[in-house]
Image (cartoon, rainbow, N blue to C red):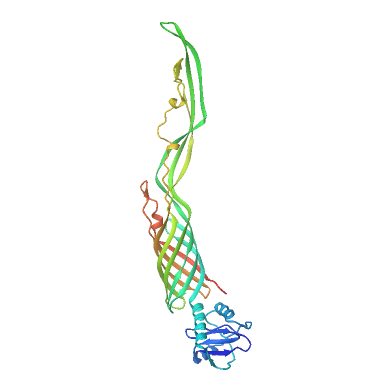
Amino acid sequence: QYKYTVYEGLTASLNINNTTGVIVEEGRMVVSGDDDNIEEVIAQAAPKQTLSPVHSLNELVQIWATYPAKANFTMKKANKLPLPEKEQEHVAKKLNLLQHFEIGIKAGFEHNNMTNRLVIAPYFERKISNKLSIIVQPALKLSFLKRQNIGDPETTYDIDHSKDKIHYDSTMVLVMPTKDTMWRRDFHFEQTHDSLRNQRYVGGAYTEIEIPLMLKYAVNNRLSVYGGINVLYSRLIRIKTATEYLGSSTLVNNNLFSFTGVPDPTIAQAFQYSGKSQAEYQYPEQPQNMLRLGYMLGVSYEINRRWKLDATLQQSSAPTNYQWGTNVNRSLALPNVRMTIGYRLGK
């Protein structure tokens, strides 16, 4: 490793390969690599982009991180001085960090035959060798579950007590053989009720959060494959009820009466309904949120340094939850296919 003085600032971007890296510290260009690599880089000169002179290591570290892997520079060789050992280690650490760390964001959609999802996923990638990387890719998913009816529909009635009508006519009657008199009350009752049809179903929108940890293998400069475990957090599928109004009916009862000293009949005695009232309709017990574990497999293609396309297959476990003969959590356990487009952050 050698140190060269930079004479008019850094006048181009940088070419970095497995053995050569360039950085500027205190107005000097520091080149890691041997003379052969350095001369080869200089020989690959291309149209240059002028930068302002760089006067500190931190400034150049930022500039270095913003340029594509294939770039060029021009420099005037000055005194050839070996780098001190500590400075070599310092430069090597900076170059290693920038070369092996990547941050970006991916967005796209996910699908199985019951659910569609919109996905947004930042990713953090750390290269551990020329071919292998570790990826953490947390994602927020907005899920849209297709409607699926649960069990058969149930018909119920709902009494509208605000429309109840009660009145009576009083008549004096003679009681034989004592010839005493008493009052007879003949009652008129009216009651209106709605007929309803209830259908339980699953469906609608809900959110999920996932955190996969994966190992990535670079097949070549553009194509990579990856896979690993996936931890998901979401609520279990909730059962909803759709209620359909079928119509209203008014019932009349003129057959009840009472006498003096005898309790009057009530409207509840006047009308008896078959079937189930809406108040007695059974709503299912709602499940709680839960953690689930699964796997994720994927392939990634880099369009260029900034953009990439990903296709993944993932599946997670989910406990069965049979309600009225249907496993309402089935959609959570199905395999999902995801397509995303990714963008690498940084200048």
Q: Along the line of sight, which residue is nearer the eye, 172 or 63?
A: 63
Q: Along the line of sight, which residue is nearer the eye, 128 or 116?
A: 128
Residue plotted at (49% across, 26% down) = 190
65 lies left or right of 150? right
Residue plotted at (59% across, 82% down) = 56
The answer to whether 265 is drawn above or below residue 249 in the figure is above
Residue 208 percent across, percent down from the top left: 46, 58
Residue 323 percent across, percent down from the top left: 38, 47
Q: Along the line of sight, which residue is nearer the eye, 92 or 321?
A: 92
In the rendered image, which quarter contains the C terminus?
Answer: bottom right
Quadrant of res 258: top left
The answer to whether 281 is drawn above or below residue 90 in the figure is above
Q: Along the line of sight, which residue is nearer the eye, 124 or 105?
A: 124
Residue plotted at (42% across, 73% down) = 216
- How many numbered marks, from 0 up? 0
The answer to whether 51 is drawn above or below residue 193 in the figure is below
Residue 6 percent across, percent down from the top left: 60, 88
Residue 268 percent across, percent down from the top left: 44, 27
Residue plotted at (43% across, 51% down) = 288
